[in-house]
Amino acid sequence: MSSVQVECVVKSSALIGEGPVWEESEQMLLFVDIAGKKIHRWSPTTKQIQSVDTGDTVSFAVPRRSGGYVAGVGRSIVAVDWSTQAMTSLVEVDEDKPNNRLNDGKVDVIGRLLAVGCLSGTMGAEQRPAEVQRRQGALFSVTSDLGVTSHLSQVDISNGMDWSLDHKTFFYIDSLSLKVDAFDYDLNTGRLGNRRTVYCMQEGEGLPDGMTVDAEGRLWVACYNGGRVINIDPATGVRLQTVSLPVMKITSCCFGGPDYSDLYVTSASLGLEQSESRQQPLAGHTFRVRGLGVKGRPSNAFSG
């Protein structure tokens, strides 16, 4: 374990850094600041950060096969043209819940976007998770023709998601449940079934937030208010490894770098007390973890 190195690499001072995605074609890290209403792109080669202002909460941004990105802005899935910074709404979800917003999104291997919504509000999930109005969230999928299907409802804070190596299992986190769950996943239809729990959070681990699966099929789960990322074997439910970080509000993670051996970890600064902020000067920055001895997988681009 002594070979594991944690380095603060992107000093973006995000209110809520989230949704890191390694963009293979650009060799850049894409991530968002939800409450800061920005999409960021960072190059590990130049150390430069580029940003687009979204004008509303932005929960995720992922590459699009036809070019540019799609992002979850407010309750809309929007197309983002990075060169012009123009945004075009493609489809709106949760139209009957004006207080909701999108919260996370990830694309499966055939290009289908899965996106989750949750209740927001002035003191929403980001600051006081325990006070969120319960059971208001949902899990949707968006296909290339922009058709929207609802898969789960009555969710508290829909968060991390990813797929097994054979794409037959969908891993999913509803943060307030303090569990990581798995579903059978039908890649042809996007349907979910046979929900079961693969891991229950332990004392001190905080809330499970964003998640990624490595090339060996193991889960890496960001622990909000837990100051760590934990590595779980979903087959046994055993925690294999813990990576401690110098900030508490860890939000998400992804593998990246030329060979996908770097783990990028986002964090939040929103909701910290003044004393906590003094103790955690790196809160809201993005970290790179090296020396884990595992690699990740390339992300998928949205087909729409």
Image: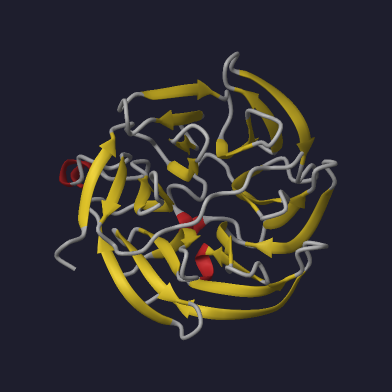
Q: Position of residue 220 (x, y in %)?
A: 42, 64
Q: Position of residue 122 (x, y in %)?
A: 52, 39
Residue 130 visible in this rendered orientation of the protein: no
> How many callouts does the rendering have?
0
Q: Position of residue 14 (x, y in %)?
A: 37, 35
Residue drawn at x 58%, y 68% as measured from the top left: 165
Identify which residue, 159 or 157, lies in the foreground. Answer: 159
Residue drawn at x 33%, y 31% as measured from the top left: 12
Please tell me in which quadrant of the rendered image residue 75 appears: top right
Identify which residue, 152 or 256, lies in the foreground. Answer: 256
Please tell me in which quadrant of the rendered image residue 89 appears: top right
Identify which residue, 91 or 43, lies in the foreground. Answer: 43
Residue drawn at x 36%, y 78% as measured from the top left: 239
| Left or right for 268, reference 211 | left
Residue drawn at x 73%, y 50% as measured from the top left: 112
Q: Position of residue 249 (x, y in %)?
A: 34, 52
| Left or right for 280, reference 93 | left
Residue 179 visible in this rendered orientation of the protein: yes
Q: Is residue 111 above or below residue 208?
A: above
- Quarter containing the N terminus: bottom left
- The coloring applied to the image is secondary structure
- Quarter containing the C terminus: top right
Identify the residue at the far front of this view. 259
| Left or right for 227, reference 115 | left
Please tell me in which quadrant of the rendered image residue 237 appears: bottom left
